[in-house]
Image (cartoon, rainbow, N blue to C red):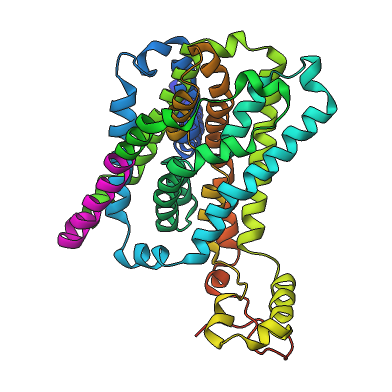
Amino acid sequence: MGDGPLNGGHQESQELNETRWRRCLSALKKVLNVVLAQWLVIGFGLSCLLAYFFPNVAAHGGIIRSEYSILYGGVSIIFLVSGLQLSHEKLRMNLTSWRLHIIVQGISFVLIPVIMLVIVRIIIAAGDLRSGAIDTSVLVGLVVLSCLPTTIASNVVMTRAAGGDDAAAIIEVVIGNTLGAFICPGLIYAFLPPQREFDAWRPASVSTLGRMYADVSMQLGLSVVLPLVVGQMVRWFWVKQVQWALDHLYLAKVSAFFLITIVWATFSSAFKTGALYRLPKGSVIFDVFINVATYLIFTLCCFFLARPPATIVNLINRNVAESRIGGRLPNIMRRAVRVRQMSKSQTVAICFCGAAKTQSLGIPLIAAMWTHTDSLTMAYIQIPVVLYTMEQVFLAQVLVYFFKWYLRRDPDQDHKEVLFSAPAGPSRVEEPP
């Protein structure tokens, strides 16, 4: 009888401990779920720390030779997985979408350089350049950055993570980087301000670009086009096996992992040069904040050019249809010049591709165009390119959550277009047949 209260107390204590353990396990499970959900951001953070403390490992020419192992091997795996995931119909449909090409490449090679030139002109007019508040090399680097094509890998991975049209992103990567290798030098020559403060920072003649063209063409062919073609061929012959591998081997996670290695290599090269430490702190801080502001501005421009408000679309189409020239156009030409809203999934791809810039072309382009200067001068010009490409990955990861919500909010609207069909009738919204 005397043992009863003691046994009861012991049982209550044991139940209390079990309750505490269950609560601890539940809390630990929640923490692990958060970590797993945010593993890409955590991976980016760890890659930055590793690059800071051990820059010689993944820098250009470092221990693992990242210019080959990551920029060729890692990027190749990303596009091999993309080739396995994408249907042939989606690639063919986006390849023939000339509106998609005009919007993305127009933003990348026309709109963004113009916006950046306006910003640089404002800085020059404000006198910050003459006062030394902002280093000239930063402005030169910003002009170079604005003329570059879209990045090669991160925009595809982010588009896929958000649920957008990754086939559209891949097509624009190939087109943009193929065009960019040839038109970027001319854009840089054209957009560099004529002020005498820039005389010491002007690039050499175009005759120095031969090696750069060869390097960029080889990287684009071996790390993007060839793996994509191989993935499509494997998907064509072994559909069931490919689907099993995608479902059970988590190949999408593999692509994201190699994106982390690209960020690691980028940060490592930035820290290894030491240019970040030698450049005035005010210039570095300015560059960091101007990159954030311009990336968000560019993304907004991409979004509204891809899906302008229905009232604006109808107004433009009505004015074109009722104009003297529009009334004389054949129906096929009238349909071609009609403004439309892109699908929501394509809009996501446009936002990630249009606002992004690549250092895969930017770094060798600067090395080729400024080959007559010393390595520190080239490193100064490369800093805005490196910082922007690093920051855009973090900002794009935040935008992934926004675009996921955007696509879930009204998925039925994804295939609707805003059309104006009657040349003299009222504006309206129709669904294509």
Depth order, front residue of 6/230: 230
Question: Hey, which quadrant is residue 215 in on the image?
Answer: top left
Q: Is residue 107 above or below residue 322?
A: above
Question: Hey, which quadrant is residue 360 in on the image?
Answer: top left
The range drawn in magenta is: 220-242
Q: Residue at x 46, y 66 (%)?
A: 97
Q: Residue at x 39, y 49 (%)?
A: 174
Depth order, front residue of 121/222: 121
Q: Residue at x 55, y 76 (%)?
A: 336
Q: Residue 172 location in percent, x, y?
A: 45, 53
Q: Is residue 12 above or below residue 343?
A: above
Q: Residue 266 location in percent, x, y?
A: 45, 25
Depth order, front residue of 422/1: 422
Q: Residue at x 19, y 61 (%)?
A: 240
Total marks shown come to 0
Apparent side of residue 253 relative to residue 104 in the rendered image (left or right): left
Q: Assign the N terminus to one quadrant of the image.
A: top left
Q: Main secondary structure of the magenta part?
A: helix
For residue 148, say whether it is visible. Answer: no
Apparent side of residue 433 relative to residue 88 in the rendered image (left or right): right
Query: Is residue 385 inside the magenta stretch?
Result: no
Q: Residue 329 location in percent, x, y?
A: 60, 85
For residue 396, say whether it is visible. Answer: yes
Apparent side of residue 265 relative to residue 398 in the rendered image (left or right): left
Depth order, front residue of 169/181: 181
Q: Residue 130 location in percent, x, y?
A: 79, 18
Q: Is residue 283 above or below residue 87?
A: above
The residue lying furthest to the right in this view is 126
